[in-house]
Amino acid sequence: MKTLAVVTRGGYVESIHQGFICVVDSEGRVIYQKGDINTSIFFRSAAKPIQIIPFIHSGGAQKMGYSLKEIAIACASHTGEVMHQETVLGILRRLGLNTDDLHCGIMSPYNHDENKRLIARNEKPTVLHVSCSGKHAAMLAYCRYKGYDIRTYEKPDHPVQKEILKTLSYFTGEEEDTIATGTDGCGLPIFMLPIKKIALSYARIVQYAQDRNSEYYEACKTIFEAMNEYPEMVAGTKEFCTELMQATKGKLIAKIGAESVYCVGVKDKKLGMCIKIADGGERAVFPVVMEMLLELDVLDKSEYEKLKHWHRAELLNHRKENVGDIIPVFRQNDDIYIGQKIK
Amino acid sequence: MPQLVVRTRSGRVESIHHGYICITDSDGKIVYSIGNPQARIFLRSSGKPIIANALVNSGAIEKFNLSLKELAVIVSSHDGTAYHRRIVKSILNKIGVSEKYLECGRKNPESPKVKKALMMLNIRPGPIFSNCSGKHAGVLALCKYYGYPVEGYTNPAHPVQQLIRSTIADILNLGTENIIVGMDGCTMPTYNLSLYQVSYLYSLLAHGKQHKGKYSDSFEIIKNAMTRYPKAVKGKGTFCTDLIYYSEGRAVGKIGAEGIYCIAIPERKLGVCIKMFDGHPRTSYPVVVRVLEELGILDAETVRKLDQWTFPKVRNDKGDTVGYLHTSFSLLNNETGSFELGDNYPKEGTRI
């Protein structure tokens, strides 16, 4: 575990975020690392682009009339805006299903305006506001395509989940029986894997998306295109994942997971990256991702300009004056400590 | 870095939290510590019961006839309910200063109910809703008492801020120039001190009038305000309030932003300062309870009453429990956790 970012106040280190970074190429060669990259973490929502693969690869997505936009929301942790709700609802209608068939629980939408609107109208959030509803809808669509039971799709022994595990094993090179599973926030099985293997799965998505000889060429190409054509579906307005893919226009795919997991697949370099902030602090992950994209020379000047507010995030007081910053520090070698004076 | 807490999911360690703890008696002796007691932190809102000494010691309490309940709100990070707002307004009335002079900014109240009500009515919260409005009212009381201008009272160069800074220096027996100043979220100066110094300040709050120092009477009054009116210090259903209430004043706790938590333990004349490195408050509460349990301050029954803070559950969106926050240190044995991410957590679902 290494110190990846600090939070400053008045020029002093007030808080510290530690974690892990791993970048590998599609052969699994380690390009960059911080901390022990064999450490196992839950993949959380960063796994979504992999979890959708069996559906596309089997021909199900095509057969069920899935658009790129609908593929994008299957890969999403969306913010529950109207555009997201409509997309998920459209899928359910086409399948002849209703919102009760989604077993993702209920949560208030991440999008502030939508949440405010609900409260102002005294409306309760619905399953369509749940950030994972697009993924759940895709699983239902896959059940319909295959003729599987739709009532138990979230159970670990359901064929959909078994096929996902198999695919995950293929993309990470980990044996199925060595992949521990847990329960995600939305009730679905989630997978524990070494950070290095998670990074590898993203390198493989971008590599297969460019390799016509790969059996996963179509599936990976579809995912890459969907996330890049509809980045607003993948997260939402003013969200990092969305802005990153909007700014870089086809260079990469990027996806956050809960408890500060972040994955990026860089197309031309065929690299996969996995970052985990050990304390789960989300505020630190964006500056660290940005610093890594600079380190890997992924961003050009104009792209960086559009994204720089994520790189050195300012802390403001209530008068909107700067009182500190979140600063990625992992490229420095010095040991950093609480209370240290820092520029 | 000392590991104090792990967060589990499905029996595995998903996140890890580090921190420092320092416990000092009122003679200035460190009794227990984990990590570096000399590490410097910003006091943030944990400074409120300390800086209130400037007010209580001045004669302003008597002059404006401020009550103990009002003093409890002056040292609070309140959650913005009508109960708290009424008390802040009462202070402002007594000192004859209008709400518009509050410089704490427009910030959503911490109480989810009040926040929701404001959103439903489409009302932008005024400064009185800010969790720091009590402190700001207290500082305005000092301005009025000394005849300082009420405008610009949050500026570090304002005489009232000089007074507060020199009060902290005086209590710690230091030159004012040794008290480094930063800016807090509410635009007020905040002070950069070591965990040792902060825990010592809280030991003085714990010791109160029995201590021989110059501020012992004012510390006693502040402690009494906090123990008599725990709801004023934060709000119903919050950790600070529950801790003071259920411990019956045996632990006087005050949160600060960025993972700071401070406690005065009157019966042992001890002060505690905890700093969680990642700055997230979610992990400081189980640490506080564990420390107080180990010190023999909280019995099993009280710990049970504090269960939601002591042993927080991680839930999924359906409400099922999928993990827990577990403390992984022992203060008395001077042990810290050695879990790695991904480790199996033994005895998941039980406090060990």
Image (spheres, grey):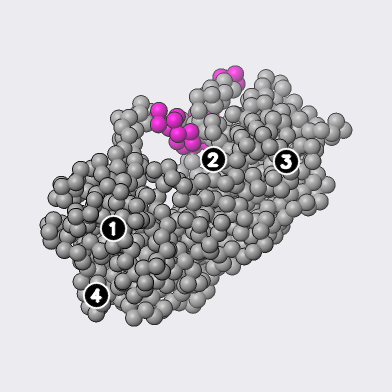
Q: Which residue is mark 3?
A: A298
Mark 2 residue type? Cys
Task: Report the chain holding disc 1.
Answer: B
Tell me the amino acid under the disc marked 3.
Val
Q: CA distance from mark 3 to mark 1?
A: 51 Å
Which numbered marker is on residue B214?
4
Residue A186 got which mark?
2
Disc 3 secondary structure class: loop
Q: Is residue B5 left or right of residue A278?
A: left
Q: Specify the amino acid type for callout 4.
A: Lys
Label 2: which secondary element: loop
Dividing the picture into quarters, in which one does residue B107 lie?
A: top left
> What range is drawn magenta here?
A93-118
- In primary-sequence order, the first of circles 3 and 2 is 2
Q: Residue at x 26, y 55 (%)?
A: B139
Residue marked by disc 1 = B159
Q: Give the answer, above or below, for where B277 lies relative to A119.
A: below
